[in-house]
Structure formats: structure tokens, C-alpha cells
Amino acid sequence: MSPSCPISQRRIDTNLVRIVSFEVLLFTLLFAVTRNDFFILTVLYDFTARVFRKENYSPFAQIAKFILKHWDAAPAYSDESPKRFALYLGFVTSFAITLFALSGFVKTALIVAVILMICAILEVLFDFCIGCKLYYALQLTKVIKHDRNFN
């Protein structure tokens, strides 16, 4: 299955995704540098809001929408399902970082945080989504059935 063929009937603006990814990168980096749990808790809260489709409660999504509104950038739409799958992976990753950090396993939390930052950097700089590639690979191996609206 080619990443360019329609997977979902829902579309998402990749400009918004890239700005949110930058915010995730920034807050995860701040957590890694300061070891302040506030930053990773903010990332977890934001992922949680977006996983439950409550973008109005997502500070990162609200900031990204504000930037795009004033940036006047043309939307660049892509299928939502792979991005949604990547969102779930980000949620699980940020949950793991938070769990490790609050349990005192700071080095493990930092290792997982580096993984999240690498994924965010690839999205921000190159529009390359690791979670999306994994989604397509799982579809090819029939682990995930062809789902037109991955929730």
C-alpha cells in the first residue's frame, strides 16, 4: 500500500501537525534538560486531549491553530489515519516517560524522551512521520486491517 493512496476519509493539515510536533519537541527537551516533571506532564496532558479528540483542551493544538491563522499558510492535507496512529504512539511514549520519571527511573525516562524527540525532529524538519511509516508497514503485514477511519 502506497503512503499516497487515500487511507482515511478524514484529512488533517500537516502544517498543524508539524507545529504541534515542534511544541512536543520543545517541552520534551525542556524536561530532559531541567528534569522538571511539569514539562513532560504538559506533553502527556496534550497528547491525552488530542487522543480523545478534545483539541479545544490541547494547548499545543490551540497554539498551532493560532500560528497558522496568523501565518496565512495554505493547508497541506494528508490522510488522518496514519497521523492518528502516530498520535497514539506519542501518547504511549509520553505516558511511559511520565511513569518512569515519577517512579524515579529518570535515566530510563530520558532514554524514552530521546526517542520521542527524534521522532518529533524528523516530523518537524523533514515531514517524515515514523508512526505513519509503522502504520503502513503494519497494514502491509495485515496486523492492522485496512481502516478508513483509524480511531
Image: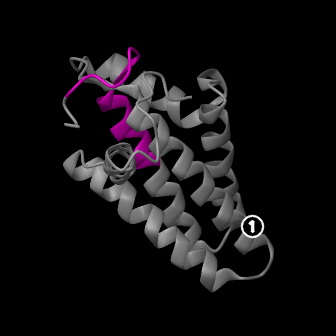
Q: Is residue 129 left or right of residue 91?
A: left
In the rendering, at what x and y percent does residue 36 appear?
68, 68
Q: Is residue 63 left or right of residue 106?
A: left
In the rendering, at what x and y percent does residue 11 appear?
36, 18
Residue 103, picture quadrant: bottom right
- The amino acid type found where label 1 is placed reads Leu
Magenta residues span: 5-23
In the rendering, at what x and y percent does residue 73 appear?
23, 20
Measuring 46% from the left and 72% from the top, which residue is drawn there? 114
How many numbered badges does the structure rendering display?
1
Q: Which residue is mark 1?
A: 99
Residue 71, picture quadrant: top left
Measuring 42% from the left and 30% from the top, which residue is drawn there? 81
Outermost residue toward the right in this view: 103
Measuring 64% from the left and 74% from the top, which residue is drawn there? 35
Does 87 appear above or below 99? Answer: above
